[in-house]
Amino acid sequence: MPWSDPSRIDLALESRSVSFENPTGARGAGGSAHGGRKGAPSRELEAGERVVLADLEGPGTIRHVWLTIPPAPPERMRAVRLEVFYDGLDAPSISVPVVDFFGVPLGRPVPLVTALSAIQEGRGFNAYYPMPFERRIRVELVNESTSRLLLYYQIDYTLDRGADARDRRDPAAPEREPSYLHVAYRRENPTVPKRDFVIFEGLRGPGRFLGSVVGIRVLQDELFAWYGEGEVKLYFDGEDPLPTICGTGLEDYVGTAWAMGPHQTPHAGVPFEIRDPARPDRRMPDLTSFYRWHLADPIVFRESLRVTIQQIGAVFVLPGEEAKRAAIDAGHPVAGAGWRRSQGAFAADWAIAERSDDYCAAAFAYCREPQAVRRYAPEEATADIRRFPYEQPSPTEGALDFVGAAIES
């Protein structure tokens, strides 16, 4: 890719950008409002309003998306939808809550740095997924909250100027093989016992699964010590009932081990984990999250791909807790090898058992052909994600309350 070698000067590419200061991206047309003295950096969106951020003719590639909206409660942050349409299609190929697009689920932006996205200081949203388009791309944002929304944004892209430009380009540059970024959102609240949650499915190949951003509202059950024993499975090209790739557990797929807590690496991590500080006895958090990018370990499919994750947890029964074991056996079928006896100082019976939680996922994939993804209902994204009584707004949210008040007035 041209950006992989910063020393390369590729004259086939023309650098452009769109924002409210230059909504068409035309050359020499930026900053015309109010004498060019920062006349149109932002816009207010009414409740329910849809705005076109970019409507561009190709061929080209979006290289970077930046935007910011004032920090707000989770249900308001989650009620902003990003949609992308390719080559004149009426249905979107990207339809996802905007915060999830940048790497964090459940409406709770936190400082984040990954190989493909960043939320700088928890409020500056950046995405670096290349988004090639052949004939046309249209990027839209929808305010599905009940309040006005202040929006700043900038989309940086390059145009490929065709045969004349190719004659001048670096002969070492590879020919462009177009593919289209697709992002689909789904949620299951709660999951069905023994039916794995589907992270990704339904797009035609050839394609490449780039990864996902997953949020989990852990449904507290005092019988369980841990929620994340489920395996991630990848089924290629119609495989059934067994997959080709089968992981070893949720935290293992994220790249850590022996449970997991907040951490970040370029390719995988946990943006946040939310626990009740008044309940140190609880081993499981109320909310958790993870992202996983398949960059160095590409997941390529020819016809189709299905990615799932099981909802299985760990249970421990100490001597004298026969009633607890009976409750587990009655309500949570034991999985794996069944009950076992731990050795050493911690003498207990333990097992992994089926459970249900509230899962959501934004799945990212490149496909050779632009295709429609499922449009989720707004309430699907915003239900059951309000702050817990012990959660506090970020200092930035409090400091910017006057902005929201000014907009509402």
Image (spheres, grey):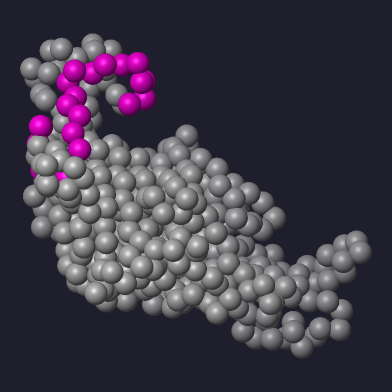
Q: Position of residue 261 (x, y in %)?
A: 63, 57
- The answer to which quarter of the image holds residue 408 is bottom left
Residue under the point 21% across and 45% down: 38
The x and y percentages for residue 282 are 69, 74
Q: Is residue 56 left or right of residue 145?
A: left
User: Residue at position x 10%, y 24% from top?
Assistant: 162
Q: Residue lying farthest bottom?
A: 323
Magenta stretch containing residue 25, yes or no?
A: yes
Q: Which residues are magenta?
A: 3-28
Q: Residue at x 69, y 77 (%)?
A: 279
Q: Quadrant of the C terminus?
A: bottom left
Query: In this rendering, does residue 178 appear at all?
Result: yes
Q: Is residue 241 left or right of residue 92?
A: right
The image quadrant that residue 36 belongs to is top left
**Residue 72, relative to residue 89: is it above or below?**
below
Measuring from the top left, give residue 222's x and y in whole percent.
Answer: 68, 80
Q: Is residue 56 visible?
A: no
Of residues 1 and 15, which is closer to you in this image?
Answer: 15
